[in-house]
Amino acid sequence: MELLRSYHRNPSIKLRNELVQLHTGLVRKMAHKFSHQCNEPYEDLEQIGYFGLIRAIERFDPSQGYAFSSFAVPYIRGEMLHFLRDRSTLLKIPRRWQELYNEGQKVRKELSESLGRPPKDAEIAQVLDVSLHEWQETKLAAQNRMPLSLDATVVHYVDCQITLGEALPCPRSAVLQHEEEERQQLQGAISELEEKPRMAVELVFLKELSRKDAAKTIGTSPMTVTRYLQKGIQDLMCMMQTQPVIANS
């Protein structure tokens, strides 16, 4: 605790390294626990755990009055969990399938050496003592659990490559494109209105003028502008009847 107080008052790499050496047991205990719950090597988990220990040392405040070990363990565990999360697949498959797939890979290698050719699925399934269907389902599950990179090339031309990310549709772009198509269709329909109804619609709905100001621009009364608007809207609905969404808007 005296070292922790000294580091808190005057941080230095020398003191930090001493504190790390004193608390290696916390990291090793946690790495040993995690190594029995995953496929990652103990050594990798231990190295990652030290990052958490260092963060704990840098953030620990001795004046708070609690034990350093209780403070450090969540940091060590958190670093290991982040590491395992980043290393894991996005989709989890049953443990039996994982074990079966791993065993199948060993069998595939052994059969390839003994047969002098890649073995068939039926031959692998026979050695594993499972049905062909179960082995194929296991293979498919194992293959589909790995995420695809958005930088993977899906189309290749002589002077152009298209990646998976570029090929996937963007919801926002699709919406914007749809809105632009609707706007152009509506603008085309407005241009086909008679002159006065067209002016009324453009002034009131597009330029957002009041009916009084629109009447001054057109050179008529607000009541007449209202009639022009009604006629313009009715004509637009007739022209856009095949596009109900636009007409309602």
Image (tube, helix red, strand yellow):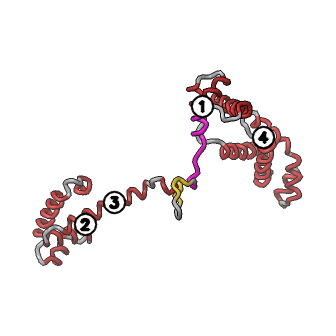
Q: What separation in Å lies between label 3 and label 2 (alpha carbons)?
A: 12 Å
In the shown orientation, is residue 151 left or right of residue 31? left
For the residue carrying disc 1, how many other residues have a C-alpha within 10 Å: few (<14), some (14-19), or many (20+)? Answer: many
Q: Does the residue at mark 4 contact the one at mark 2 (Cβ under 8 Å)?
A: no
For the residue carrying disc 4, how many other residues have a C-alpha within 10 Å: few (<14), some (14-19), or many (20+)? Answer: few
Query: If you read the primary sequence from the N terminus, does the residue marked by circle 3 or circle 2 appear first?
Result: 3
Residue 187: give its label: 2
Residue identified by numbered label 4: 41
Q: Nearer the viewer, residue 147 or 54?
A: 147
Tell us which disc is closer to us: 4 or 1.
1
- For the point 72% across and 47% down, the residue is 79
Part of the protein shown in magenta = 139-151
Residue identified by numbered label 1: 138
Q: Nearer the viewer, residue 154 or 59?
A: 154
Residue identified by numbered label 3: 179
- For the point 59% across and 23% down, the residue is 131
Measured from the top left, where is residue 214 in percent x and y?
Answer: 18, 73
